[in-house]
Image: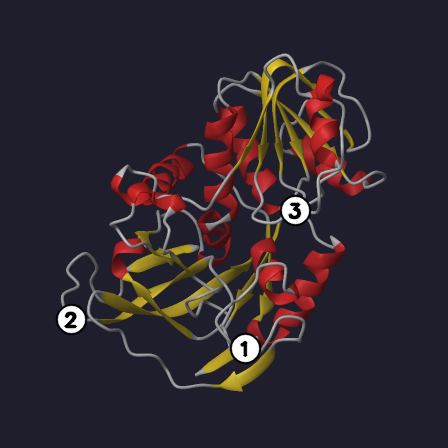
Amino acid sequence: MKAMLLDAPGLPLRLADVPRPDPAAGEIRVKVAACGVCRTDLHVADGDLEHPKQPIIPGHEIVGRVEKLGPGVTTFALGDRVGIPWLGHTCGTCPYCQSGRENLCDRPGFTGYQIDGGYAEYAVADASYCFPIPEGLGDVEAAPLLCAGLIGYRSLRMAEPCRVLGIYGFGAAAHIVAQVARHEGMEVLAFVRPGDTAAQDFARALGCIWAGGSDEAPPRPLDAAIVFAPVGSLVPQALAAVRKGGTVVLGGIHMSDIPSMPYSLLWGERAVRSVANLTRQDAIDFLALAPRIPVKTHTEAMPLAQANEALGRLRRGDLTGALVLVP
């Protein structure tokens, strides 16, 4: 099969012919129809996330059809349309798994990082960590739900209670969570790269009541803020925009260093929280909610062989919505 391989962090991905994987017990093989390009893929490729499997096939926003069942799989049938997310395995025995916090598992496996992912024609995954994809969305449109949507949803739940929400960095995750927040009656304010009028227009088109530069103060205090941009200097700015008792949620897996800041920004029972991965319950809840809203993803499809170009565009911020690779 054709696959894009990362031989080591810092190197460009290379298109290669590799053996088509066979599913082991409890696994399924999926013929990939679409795989979203996520900022986490960029962090893996650039070496921000250390010690990936080498070589690794990146990609963890995977949509496809079940093409082969491993021994013991009864939850899916051949031809079922499924999604494969970032969380690919947990140990089930550590204190976090035992207390319903499998997103914090001590011995996890992540798709496209330790487990080969979806920048390929086929992917193998543990069936217990795969999910049916709701009808009403095409394969390309559904792909960003598997990480941008899930992490955005978990971030939003951490921001509650909230009536006035600020979002810093208006990319793939933000454009999905903004729709969820609006559906739930929140007022949403978007903070984008200074001078990026296209992103401001995009945010307003999705129902944001205000859109401005990330260096600007909002027109009213925020109940909570979600920071999706991996820029540590935005944390004190978000704290300054949040009212007393509010929460700043950090929605990325990697961020540049947070600068020194006066304690007065945090005082008043403001809180800063990070989001780590996702749970399978997050996926069940969000994938049930998304078609009821309905969430409409803004996507651009690119051929699998152009994965390096897609990552470069993401690195430069040269996109609106989400990029999706199609084998």
**Mark 1 to mark 3 CA distance (whole Å):** 25 Å
Q: Position of residue 219 (x, y in %)?
A: 76, 16
Counting residues from the start of the chain, the first of labels 3 and 2 encountered is: 2
Q: Residue flagged by tag 3: what amino acid is it?
A: Met
**Mark 2 to mark 1 CA distance (whole Å):** 28 Å
Identify which residue is drawn at 26% across, 60% down. Answer: 127
Discs 1/3, front: 3
Specify the label residue 71 is tagged with: 2
Q: Residue flagged by tag 1: what amino acid is it?
A: Leu
Judge the density around disc 2: few (<14), some (14-19), many (≥20) Cα neighbours within 10 Å. Answer: few
Say which quarter of the image contains residue 220.
Answer: top right
Q: Position of residue 28 (x, y in %)?
A: 27, 67
**Mark 3 to mark 2 CA distance (whole Å):** 40 Å
Judge the density around disc 3: few (<14), some (14-19), many (≥20) Cα neighbours within 10 Å. Answer: some
Left or right: 77 as drawn, with respect to 281: left
- Judge whether 77 appears above or below 39 on screen: below
Q: Which residue is mark 3?
A: 255
Q: Secondary structure at mark 1?
A: strand
Identify which residue is drawn at 39% across, 86% down. Answer: 19
Q: Position of residue 267 (x, y in %)?
A: 66, 15
Spot the residue most to the right.
195
Q: Position of residue 11 (x, y in %)?
A: 66, 75
Question: What sort of colour scheme is used for the picture?
Answer: secondary structure
Front in this rendered view, residue 64 or 162:
162
For the question of whether residue 84 can be seen, the reply is no
Left or right: 23 as drawn, with respect to 254: left
Say which quarter of the image contains residue 234.
Answer: top right
